[in-house]
Each structure stands twice: as C-alpha cells, then as structure tokens.
Image: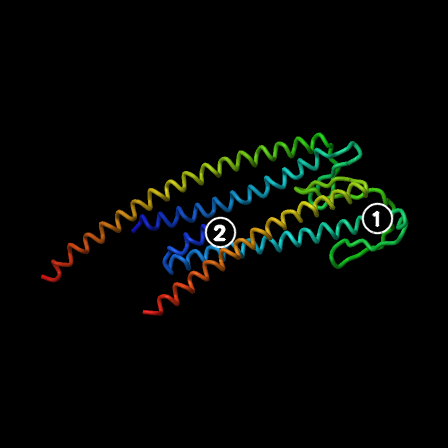
Amino acid sequence: MSEVEEYQQVAQKLDNLIEVRQKLQIQYNENNQVKEEFSKLTPNNTVYKIIGPALVEQSQQESKLNVDKRIEFIQSEIDRTENEISTTQQKMQTLQQTISKLQQAQVEAAEKAQPAAAA
Amino acid sequence: MASEGKAIDVSQLSLQQLSGVKKQIDEELSHLTQSYAQLRRAMIQFKQSASAVAEINPANKEKKVLVPLTTSLYVPGKLTDVENVLVDIGTGYYVKKTTQEADKHYKSKVDYVNKNLETLQQTLEKKQDNANVVVQIMQAKLSAGEKP
C-alpha cells in the first residue's frame, strides 16, 4: 500500500503549499496597501523604516522602489507556488486513480478467492 | 433566491452526505466568525488611534505625559510637537503626517474596515441560512425515516 502512503504525503504537501500561498497573499496585500499609502505622500511626509528597535529615516524614492521590488518578488513567489500547487493536484489525481484501480483489483481477487475457499 | 435553488439540490442528498455538507458549512462559518472578530479588533484599534490623534492638539502643547517604554515601564515626557505624528502604514514603514492627515488616514481605515465588516456580515448570514436549511432537511429526513 505504498501508493496510499505516497498519496497521504502528496496531500500533506498540498496543504502546506496552500498555507504558503495564503501567507504570500497576505504579504502581497499588505505591501500593496503600503504602495497605495506611498502614492499619497507629499514632500512633507517623511518616511521612516523600522530596523530592529529603531526608526530610520528613508528617502521616499528609495522606499517606493523598495516596496515595488518586494511586490514583484512576492508576485513571482505566488506564481511559483501556484504552479507547484497545480502539479501537486495533478499528481494527487493520478495517484487517486492508481489507488482506486488497485482497490478494484483487490475486490476482484477476493471475489475469485471466495468460491475457492468455499470448495 | 440562490439559496432556494441550492436547497432543492441538497434535498436529494443522503443523510450521510448532508452531514458532510453541514460539517463543511460549519467550518466555513467558524472561519468567517473568526475573521469577523479580527476585523472588529482592527477597527477598534484604528478608532483608538484616531481618538489618540485628536488629543494631540495645540491645547495640550507642553503638557506632561507618561511615555510607555514597555508595557510596564513609563517615563515622564512633555508634549512638544502637536502638529505631527508617525503613522504605521505596514511592513515596517512609518510616515510622518500632520494630525489632520493622520485623522483622515485613520478615518478612511475605519470606513474601509467597516465596509468589509458589512459584506462579511451578509456572507455570514447567508451561510447561517444555508446551515439552517441543511439542518431542516436532515431533521425532515430523519423523522421521515422513523416512520415505516
């Protein structure tokens, strides 16, 4: 029944991937909100970034670029995870088919064995 | 009326399938309720921030305050700048805003969260209706099954 074990492993992997996907989405949303805030800045709005326990002044330009780059990175991570999710789902499907075939074969074998045992 | 169409659909299901559906709806309900509570907390925080900003006004200039360094340690301070505040806008970024800007910022956040709360409330009610329909059908099937 190694197929069943493999199936469980793949299902576990899919769960993990979906969790990763959700976390990425949260990061993506938060960064987009920051981007939106940045778009509303006036020259008077000094930007600070928290580094460890300290607030450090940042240039608006640099901060905007930084957030844009982060969004780009997260987007590529999202795409990568999406791809992995769909290949994992496909793998699960093929495994499911193999398992149900095996189960059917087992049932048929049992039916065949029945009259022999009765005789 | 979409739920009615769904109800007709569910009435064809077996008891076992129905309890599966019920379980799934319950899980969705508890997830949505959790999100609702989280959003409520977020809104309360934004409201608190807005009312704190309102206290930073010229009338309170030079007044003594106690500044929390940790949750259990305070040091005395004096309110010198009553025009500007630093607002956390997420992912570790803070922006210096005038009190008017900060007030606007928090109020728009409250509005935004409120809107989400309303849609979530509607979704919750619909889900609750769905759950009730499923329970009703289950009960109907059970009592029908008891009779010969």
User: Which tag, 2 or 1, sits closer to the chain's start?
Assistant: 2
The span from disc 2 to disc 1 (Cα, nearest Å) is 50 Å
Q: x%, y% of residue A62? A: 69, 31
Number of the label disc, if any, that sits on residue A27? none
Instruction: Look at 46% across and 48% down and name the residue there.
Output: A15
Query: In this rendering, do the residues under marks 2 and 1 share a single chain?
Result: yes
Q: Which residue is at the front of the view, A56 or B15?
A: B15
Scheme of colours in the image? rainbow
Q: x%, y% of residue B117? A: 63, 50
Label 2 or label 1, whichever lies nearer to me, is 2
In this view, A63 is above or below A25? above
Number of the label disc, if any, that sits on residue B3? 2
Instruction: Look at 65% across and 54% down and name the residue there.
Output: B40
Disc 2 secondary structure class: helix
Q: x%, y% of residue B44? A: 70, 53
Instruction: Look at 77% across and 33% down and name the residue there.
Output: A42
In this view, A88 is above or below B47? above
In this view, A102 is above or below A41? below
Q: Which residue is at the front of the view, B2 or A100?
A: B2
Instruction: Look at 63% across and 37% down and name the residue there.
Output: A32
Kindly identify the amino acid type of the residue bearing the numbered disc 2. Answer: Ser
Q: For residue B75, which quarter of the picture?
A: bottom right
Return the residue at label 1. Answer: B56
User: Contact, CB < 8 Å: mark 2 with mark 1?
Assistant: no
Is B123 on the left or on the right of B97, as rendered?
left
Disc 1 secondary structure class: loop
Q: Identify the subunit bearing mark 1.
A: B
